[in-house]
Image (tube, rainbow, N blue to C red):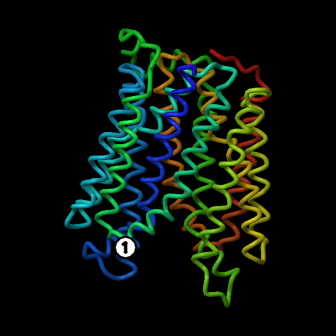
Protein backbone atom coordinates (compact mmCIF):
# COMPACT_ATOMS: atom_id res chain seq x y z
CA UNK A 1 0.00 0.00 0.00
CA UNK A 2 1.25 3.48 -0.82
CA UNK A 3 2.47 5.55 2.13
CA UNK A 4 -0.04 8.36 1.64
CA UNK A 5 -2.96 5.92 1.58
CA UNK A 6 -1.72 4.08 4.66
CA UNK A 7 -1.37 7.43 6.46
CA UNK A 8 -4.93 8.32 5.42
CA UNK A 9 -6.40 5.18 6.96
CA UNK A 10 -4.38 5.56 10.16
CA UNK A 11 -5.39 9.22 10.44
CA UNK A 12 -9.01 8.28 9.77
CA UNK A 13 -8.89 5.86 12.71
CA UNK A 14 -7.13 8.40 14.95
CA UNK A 15 -9.51 11.22 14.01
CA UNK A 16 -12.52 8.94 14.49
CA UNK A 17 -11.48 7.75 17.93
CA UNK A 18 -10.50 11.24 19.14
CA UNK A 19 -13.77 12.72 17.82
CA UNK A 20 -15.66 9.85 19.46
CA UNK A 21 -13.96 10.64 22.76
CA UNK A 22 -14.22 14.43 22.63
CA UNK A 23 -17.91 14.44 21.67
CA UNK A 24 -18.75 12.22 24.65
CA UNK A 25 -18.34 15.30 26.83
CA UNK A 26 -21.45 17.02 25.44
CA UNK A 27 -24.11 15.06 27.34
CA UNK A 28 -21.93 14.60 30.44
CA UNK A 29 -20.74 18.18 31.03
CA UNK A 30 -23.93 19.70 32.55
CA UNK A 31 -24.41 16.69 34.83
CA UNK A 32 -20.73 16.68 35.79
CA UNK A 33 -20.93 20.39 36.58
CA UNK A 34 -23.86 19.69 38.91
CA UNK A 35 -21.85 16.86 40.48
CA UNK A 36 -19.06 19.39 41.16
CA UNK A 37 -21.37 21.51 43.31
CA UNK A 38 -23.17 23.90 40.94
CA UNK A 39 -26.93 23.79 41.53
CA UNK A 40 -29.95 25.42 39.89
CA UNK A 41 -30.85 25.25 36.19
CA UNK A 42 -29.68 28.81 35.45
CA UNK A 43 -26.28 28.36 37.14
CA UNK A 44 -25.70 24.99 35.48
CA UNK A 45 -26.60 26.43 32.07
CA UNK A 46 -24.26 29.37 32.64
CA UNK A 47 -21.32 27.21 33.63
CA UNK A 48 -22.03 24.69 30.88
CA UNK A 49 -21.70 27.49 28.32
CA UNK A 50 -18.48 28.75 29.90
CA UNK A 51 -16.89 25.31 30.17
CA UNK A 52 -17.98 24.28 26.66
CA UNK A 53 -17.05 27.55 24.94
CA UNK A 54 -13.69 28.12 26.63
CA UNK A 55 -12.20 25.21 24.70
CA UNK A 56 -13.15 26.70 21.32
CA UNK A 57 -11.74 30.12 22.13
CA UNK A 58 -8.32 28.74 23.04
CA UNK A 59 -8.44 26.41 20.02
CA UNK A 60 -9.07 29.37 17.72
CA UNK A 61 -6.19 31.36 19.23
CA UNK A 62 -3.57 28.61 19.21
CA UNK A 63 -4.44 26.72 15.99
CA UNK A 64 -2.18 28.90 13.75
CA UNK A 65 0.70 28.49 16.22
CA UNK A 66 0.54 24.71 16.06
CA UNK A 67 0.13 24.98 12.29
CA UNK A 68 3.43 26.87 12.16
CA UNK A 69 5.16 24.22 14.24
CA UNK A 70 3.67 21.50 12.01
CA UNK A 71 5.38 23.17 9.03
CA UNK A 72 8.61 23.52 10.99
CA UNK A 73 8.95 20.23 12.88
CA UNK A 74 6.74 17.87 10.90
CA UNK A 75 3.03 17.00 10.91
CA UNK A 76 3.45 13.61 12.59
CA UNK A 77 5.20 15.20 15.58
CA UNK A 78 2.24 17.57 16.03
CA UNK A 79 -0.24 14.67 15.82
CA UNK A 80 1.72 12.83 18.52
CA UNK A 81 2.06 15.93 20.72
CA UNK A 82 -1.63 16.80 20.49
CA UNK A 83 -2.99 13.28 21.04
CA UNK A 84 -0.67 12.66 24.01
CA UNK A 85 -1.57 15.98 25.65
CA UNK A 86 -5.26 15.36 25.05
CA UNK A 87 -5.01 11.98 26.77
CA UNK A 88 -3.32 13.56 29.81
CA UNK A 89 -5.55 16.64 30.08
CA UNK A 90 -8.87 14.84 29.60
CA UNK A 91 -7.84 12.15 32.11
CA UNK A 92 -7.10 14.92 34.62
CA UNK A 93 -10.67 16.21 34.14
CA UNK A 94 -11.85 13.05 35.88
CA UNK A 95 -10.05 14.13 39.07
CA UNK A 96 -11.09 17.81 39.39
CA UNK A 97 -12.70 19.07 42.61
CA UNK A 98 -14.56 22.11 41.30
CA UNK A 99 -15.83 23.80 38.15
CA UNK A 100 -12.93 26.28 38.06
CA UNK A 101 -10.39 23.48 37.67
CA UNK A 102 -12.56 21.92 34.96
CA UNK A 103 -12.72 25.25 33.08
CA UNK A 104 -8.96 25.66 33.33
CA UNK A 105 -8.36 22.20 31.91
CA UNK A 106 -10.80 22.89 29.06
CA UNK A 107 -8.80 26.03 28.20
CA UNK A 108 -5.56 24.01 28.27
CA UNK A 109 -7.25 21.34 26.16
CA UNK A 110 -7.85 23.87 23.39
CA UNK A 111 -4.49 25.61 23.77
CA UNK A 112 -2.47 22.39 23.59
CA UNK A 113 -4.55 20.62 20.95
CA UNK A 114 -4.25 21.09 17.17
CA UNK A 115 -4.76 17.38 16.51
CA UNK A 116 -7.32 17.76 13.71
CA UNK A 117 -5.30 20.49 11.99
CA UNK A 118 -2.12 18.41 12.03
CA UNK A 119 -3.92 15.34 10.64
CA UNK A 120 -5.55 17.38 7.87
CA UNK A 121 -2.22 19.01 6.97
CA UNK A 122 -0.40 15.67 6.85
CA UNK A 123 -2.97 14.15 4.50
CA UNK A 124 -3.36 17.32 2.40
CA UNK A 125 0.38 17.63 1.76
CA UNK A 126 1.16 13.95 1.14
CA UNK A 127 -1.82 12.96 -1.01
CA UNK A 128 -1.48 13.30 -4.81
CA UNK A 129 -3.29 16.44 -6.02
CA UNK A 130 -5.73 14.45 -8.14
CA UNK A 131 -6.99 12.58 -5.03
CA UNK A 132 -6.90 15.28 -2.35
CA UNK A 133 -10.66 15.82 -2.47
CA UNK A 134 -11.40 12.14 -1.91
CA UNK A 135 -8.88 11.98 0.95
CA UNK A 136 -10.37 15.05 2.64
CA UNK A 137 -13.82 13.50 2.33
CA UNK A 138 -12.64 10.24 3.91
CA UNK A 139 -11.00 12.12 6.81
CA UNK A 140 -14.11 14.26 7.27
CA UNK A 141 -16.30 11.14 7.45
CA UNK A 142 -14.17 9.87 10.35
CA UNK A 143 -14.59 13.15 12.20
CA UNK A 144 -18.34 13.28 11.64
CA UNK A 145 -18.77 9.60 12.46
CA UNK A 146 -17.01 9.98 15.80
CA UNK A 147 -18.91 13.15 16.61
CA UNK A 148 -22.20 11.45 15.75
CA UNK A 149 -21.65 8.36 17.91
CA UNK A 150 -19.85 10.10 20.78
CA UNK A 151 -22.84 11.63 22.64
CA UNK A 152 -24.72 8.31 22.55
CA UNK A 153 -21.68 6.35 23.73
CA UNK A 154 -20.80 8.98 26.35
CA UNK A 155 -24.32 9.04 27.79
CA UNK A 156 -24.24 5.24 28.13
CA UNK A 157 -20.78 5.25 29.77
CA UNK A 158 -21.80 7.99 32.23
CA UNK A 159 -24.67 5.84 33.45
CA UNK A 160 -22.60 2.64 33.66
CA UNK A 161 -19.25 3.80 35.07
CA UNK A 162 -19.92 7.37 36.26
CA UNK A 163 -18.76 10.81 35.16
CA UNK A 164 -15.19 10.69 36.41
CA UNK A 165 -14.48 7.30 34.87
CA UNK A 166 -15.98 8.54 31.58
CA UNK A 167 -13.35 11.29 31.34
CA UNK A 168 -10.62 8.76 32.11
CA UNK A 169 -11.95 6.49 29.34
CA UNK A 170 -11.87 9.42 26.90
CA UNK A 171 -8.24 10.01 27.86
CA UNK A 172 -7.52 6.35 27.12
CA UNK A 173 -9.11 6.72 23.67
CA UNK A 174 -6.83 9.65 22.89
CA UNK A 175 -3.86 7.57 24.04
CA UNK A 176 -4.87 4.77 21.65
CA UNK A 177 -4.85 7.38 18.85
CA UNK A 178 -1.35 8.42 19.99
CA UNK A 179 -0.09 4.81 19.89
CA UNK A 180 -1.61 4.15 16.46
CA UNK A 181 -0.12 7.38 15.06
CA UNK A 182 3.30 6.67 16.59
CA UNK A 183 3.48 3.14 15.19
CA UNK A 184 1.94 3.47 11.75
CA UNK A 185 2.14 7.04 10.38
CA UNK A 186 5.09 7.64 8.08
CA UNK A 187 6.01 11.18 7.15
CA UNK A 188 7.79 10.96 3.82
CA UNK A 189 8.98 14.54 3.48
CA UNK A 190 11.04 16.73 5.81
CA UNK A 191 10.73 20.45 5.12
CA UNK A 192 13.89 22.49 5.41
CA UNK A 193 13.95 24.31 8.73
CA UNK A 194 15.28 27.55 7.24
CA UNK A 195 12.21 27.75 4.99
CA UNK A 196 9.86 27.65 7.99
CA UNK A 197 11.25 30.57 10.02
CA UNK A 198 8.88 32.97 8.31
CA UNK A 199 6.94 35.79 9.93
CA UNK A 200 3.31 36.55 9.13
CA UNK A 201 4.19 39.10 6.41
CA UNK A 202 6.48 36.60 4.65
CA UNK A 203 3.82 33.90 4.84
CA UNK A 204 1.25 36.34 3.43
CA UNK A 205 3.54 37.19 0.52
CA UNK A 206 3.92 33.51 -0.36
CA UNK A 207 0.19 33.11 -0.95
CA UNK A 208 -0.58 33.06 -4.70
CA UNK A 209 -3.95 34.81 -4.28
CA UNK A 210 -4.79 36.82 -1.18
CA UNK A 211 -8.44 37.33 -2.06
CA UNK A 212 -8.98 33.60 -2.64
CA UNK A 213 -7.38 32.74 0.71
CA UNK A 214 -9.41 35.36 2.60
CA UNK A 215 -12.58 34.17 0.87
CA UNK A 216 -11.90 30.59 1.95
CA UNK A 217 -11.24 31.60 5.57
CA UNK A 218 -14.42 33.69 5.73
CA UNK A 219 -16.38 30.88 4.06
CA UNK A 220 -15.24 28.48 6.78
CA UNK A 221 -16.30 30.95 9.49
CA UNK A 222 -19.69 31.55 7.84
CA UNK A 223 -20.48 27.86 7.31
CA UNK A 224 -19.67 27.03 10.95
CA UNK A 225 -21.61 30.07 12.16
CA UNK A 226 -24.62 28.98 10.10
CA UNK A 227 -24.51 25.36 11.25
CA UNK A 228 -23.90 26.14 14.92
CA UNK A 229 -26.52 28.90 15.14
CA UNK A 230 -29.14 26.15 14.74
CA UNK A 231 -27.61 23.54 17.05
CA UNK A 232 -28.56 25.06 20.45
CA UNK A 233 -32.19 25.66 19.47
CA UNK A 234 -33.06 22.48 17.54
CA UNK A 235 -34.40 20.74 20.66
CA UNK A 236 -36.57 23.75 21.55
CA UNK A 237 -37.87 23.89 17.97
CA UNK A 238 -38.72 20.19 18.02
CA UNK A 239 -40.57 20.68 21.31
CA UNK A 240 -42.72 23.31 19.59
CA UNK A 241 -43.40 20.96 16.67
CA UNK A 242 -44.10 17.97 18.92
CA UNK A 243 -46.64 19.28 21.39
CA UNK A 244 -48.26 16.39 23.22
CA UNK A 245 -45.39 13.88 22.92
CA UNK A 246 -43.13 12.68 25.73
CA UNK A 247 -40.22 11.63 23.52
CA UNK A 248 -38.62 15.00 22.76
CA UNK A 249 -35.10 13.80 23.61
CA UNK A 250 -35.41 10.74 21.36
CA UNK A 251 -36.84 12.74 18.46
CA UNK A 252 -34.18 15.43 18.87
CA UNK A 253 -31.44 12.81 18.84
CA UNK A 254 -32.82 11.33 15.62
CA UNK A 255 -33.00 14.76 13.95
CA UNK A 256 -29.45 15.58 15.09
CA UNK A 257 -28.21 12.24 13.79
CA UNK A 258 -29.89 12.66 10.39
CA UNK A 259 -27.50 15.33 9.10
CA UNK A 260 -24.43 13.57 10.48
CA UNK A 261 -25.40 10.26 8.92
CA UNK A 262 -25.97 11.94 5.57
CA UNK A 263 -22.53 13.61 5.77
CA UNK A 264 -20.83 10.28 6.42
CA UNK A 265 -22.52 8.84 3.34
CA UNK A 266 -21.83 11.72 0.98
CA UNK A 267 -18.41 13.10 2.08
CA UNK A 268 -16.20 10.52 0.28
CA UNK A 269 -18.42 10.64 -2.82
CA UNK A 270 -18.34 14.44 -2.98
CA UNK A 271 -14.58 14.24 -2.50
CA UNK A 272 -14.26 12.03 -5.58
CA UNK A 273 -16.48 14.40 -7.55
CA UNK A 274 -14.34 17.38 -6.49
CA UNK A 275 -11.21 15.57 -7.73
CA UNK A 276 -12.92 15.14 -11.10
CA UNK A 277 -14.57 18.56 -11.61
CA UNK A 278 -12.71 20.76 -9.12
CA UNK A 279 -13.32 21.51 -5.41
CA UNK A 280 -14.38 25.09 -6.22
CA UNK A 281 -17.42 23.76 -8.10
CA UNK A 282 -18.41 21.41 -5.28
CA UNK A 283 -17.97 24.22 -2.73
CA UNK A 284 -20.18 26.60 -4.71
CA UNK A 285 -22.90 23.99 -5.25
CA UNK A 286 -22.81 22.90 -1.58
CA UNK A 287 -23.15 26.50 -0.34
CA UNK A 288 -26.12 27.25 -2.61
CA UNK A 289 -27.90 23.96 -1.87
CA UNK A 290 -27.29 24.24 1.88
CA UNK A 291 -28.53 27.85 1.91
CA UNK A 292 -31.66 26.86 0.00
CA UNK A 293 -32.34 23.91 2.34
CA UNK A 294 -32.19 26.04 5.50
CA UNK A 295 -35.13 28.23 4.47
CA UNK A 296 -37.89 25.56 4.23
CA UNK A 297 -36.92 24.33 7.71
CA UNK A 298 -38.62 27.46 9.04
CA UNK A 299 -41.96 26.30 7.60
CA UNK A 300 -42.11 22.65 8.74
CA UNK A 301 -45.02 21.51 10.87
CA UNK A 302 -43.81 18.06 11.93
CA UNK A 303 -40.48 16.74 13.27
CA UNK A 304 -40.18 14.17 10.48
CA UNK A 305 -40.22 16.99 7.92
CA UNK A 306 -37.40 18.72 9.78
CA UNK A 307 -35.48 15.43 9.97
CA UNK A 308 -35.84 14.87 6.22
CA UNK A 309 -34.60 18.38 5.44
CA UNK A 310 -31.71 17.98 7.90
CA UNK A 311 -30.73 14.73 6.14
CA UNK A 312 -30.66 16.54 2.78
CA UNK A 313 -28.72 19.37 4.41
CA UNK A 314 -26.13 16.87 5.65
CA UNK A 315 -25.66 15.57 2.10
CA UNK A 316 -24.80 19.13 1.00
CA UNK A 317 -22.72 20.32 3.97
CA UNK A 318 -20.44 17.27 3.63
CA UNK A 319 -18.94 19.06 0.63
CA UNK A 320 -18.14 22.31 2.42
CA UNK A 321 -15.16 21.87 4.76
CA UNK A 322 -13.38 19.16 2.70
CA UNK A 323 -13.62 21.40 -0.39
CA UNK A 324 -12.21 24.39 1.49
CA UNK A 325 -9.34 22.30 2.87
CA UNK A 326 -8.64 20.91 -0.61
CA UNK A 327 -8.57 24.41 -2.12
CA UNK A 328 -6.21 25.65 0.59
CA UNK A 329 -3.91 22.66 0.16
CA UNK A 330 -3.83 23.05 -3.63
CA UNK A 331 -3.34 26.82 -3.63
CA UNK A 332 -0.74 27.09 -0.86
CA UNK A 333 3.00 26.29 -1.00
CA UNK A 334 3.74 23.21 1.13
CA UNK A 335 6.13 25.09 3.40
CA UNK A 336 3.20 27.12 4.78
CA UNK A 337 0.30 24.68 4.33
CA UNK A 338 0.19 23.91 8.05
CA UNK A 339 -0.11 27.59 8.94
CA UNK A 340 -2.76 28.19 6.28
CA UNK A 341 -4.86 25.28 7.53
CA UNK A 342 -4.25 26.43 11.09
CA UNK A 343 -5.67 29.87 10.30
CA UNK A 344 -8.61 28.18 8.61
CA UNK A 345 -9.23 26.10 11.72
CA UNK A 346 -9.17 29.29 13.79
CA UNK A 347 -11.91 30.66 11.54
CA UNK A 348 -13.81 27.41 12.03
CA UNK A 349 -13.71 27.59 15.84
CA UNK A 350 -14.59 31.29 15.93
CA UNK A 351 -17.57 30.41 13.73
CA UNK A 352 -18.62 27.71 16.20
CA UNK A 353 -18.43 30.13 19.12
CA UNK A 354 -20.15 33.06 17.38
CA UNK A 355 -22.86 30.85 15.90
CA UNK A 356 -23.70 29.22 19.23
CA UNK A 357 -24.15 32.60 20.88
CA UNK A 358 -25.83 34.38 17.95
CA UNK A 359 -28.40 31.66 17.26
CA UNK A 360 -29.73 31.67 20.80
CA UNK A 361 -29.85 35.46 20.97
CA UNK A 362 -31.62 35.76 17.63
CA UNK A 363 -34.15 33.06 18.52
CA UNK A 364 -34.93 34.85 21.79
CA UNK A 365 -35.32 38.24 20.11
CA UNK A 366 -37.16 37.36 16.88
CA UNK A 367 -38.23 33.71 17.09
CA UNK A 368 -36.64 30.42 16.06
CA UNK A 369 -37.91 30.47 12.48
CA UNK A 370 -36.00 33.68 11.73
CA UNK A 371 -32.72 31.94 12.58
CA UNK A 372 -33.30 29.61 9.60
CA UNK A 373 -33.96 32.61 7.33
CA UNK A 374 -30.78 34.32 8.52
CA UNK A 375 -28.50 31.29 8.16
CA UNK A 376 -29.94 30.34 4.78
CA UNK A 377 -29.51 33.88 3.47
CA UNK A 378 -25.99 34.07 4.87
CA UNK A 379 -24.92 30.90 3.03
CA UNK A 380 -26.50 32.06 -0.23
CA UNK A 381 -24.69 35.41 -0.04
CA UNK A 382 -21.46 33.57 0.75
CA UNK A 383 -22.12 31.38 -2.30
CA UNK A 384 -22.35 34.46 -4.51
CA UNK A 385 -19.03 35.72 -3.10
CA UNK A 386 -17.38 32.35 -3.79
CA UNK A 387 -18.81 32.44 -7.34
CA UNK A 388 -17.25 35.85 -8.10
CA UNK A 389 -14.00 35.35 -6.15
CA UNK A 390 -13.07 31.71 -6.79
CA UNK A 391 -15.35 30.06 -9.34
CA UNK A 392 -15.22 32.75 -12.06
CA UNK A 393 -11.53 33.48 -11.61
CA UNK A 394 -8.86 31.16 -12.98
CA UNK A 395 -7.93 28.92 -10.06
CA UNK A 396 -4.20 28.25 -9.76
CA UNK A 397 -2.72 25.39 -7.76
CA UNK A 398 0.74 25.20 -6.32
Q: Quadrant of the C terminus?
A: top right
Image point (33%, 48%), residue name: 109
Compared with 241, 75 (above or below) is above
Q: Viewer-proximal residue, 333 or 82? A: 82
Q: Is residue 176 above or below residue 196?
A: below
Q: At which x and y percent is residue 17?
A: 46, 47
Q: Position of residue 44 (x, y in %)?
A: 36, 74
Where is residue 191? Give x, y as percent: 42, 12
Look at 32% across and 70% down and name the residue there: 162
Name the residue at 75% across, 48% down.
380
Q: Is residue 376 above or below residue 135?
A: below
Residue found at the far front of this picture: 1
Residue at position x 53%, y 38% from top? 12
When asked about the image quadrant of residue 8, the answer is top right
Secondary structure of the residue carrying numbered label 1: helix
Q: Which residue is mark 1?
A: 31
Query: Is 51 in front, or is 308?
Result: 308
| Residue 200, image x, y percentages | 43, 22
Question: Is the residue marked by circle 1 packed among few (<14), some (14-19), or many (20+) residues within 10 Å?
Answer: some
Q: How many marks?
A: 1
State left or right for residue 232 relative to residue 186.
right
Whether residue 94 sits left or right of residue 367 in the image: it is left
Indicate left or right for 157 with 299 as reference. Answer: left
Amino acid sequence: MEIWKKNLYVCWFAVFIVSLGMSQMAPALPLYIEHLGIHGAAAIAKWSGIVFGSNFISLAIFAPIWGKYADKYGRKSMILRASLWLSIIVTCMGFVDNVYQLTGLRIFQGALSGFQSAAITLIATQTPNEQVGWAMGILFSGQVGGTLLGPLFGGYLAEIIGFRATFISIGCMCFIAFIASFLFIQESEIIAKKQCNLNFHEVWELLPSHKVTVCLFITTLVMQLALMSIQPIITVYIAQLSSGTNHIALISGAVFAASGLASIISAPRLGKISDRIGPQKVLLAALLVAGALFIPQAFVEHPWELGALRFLLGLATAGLLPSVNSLIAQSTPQIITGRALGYNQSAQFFGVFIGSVLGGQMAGAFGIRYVFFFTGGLLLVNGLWVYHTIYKEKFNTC
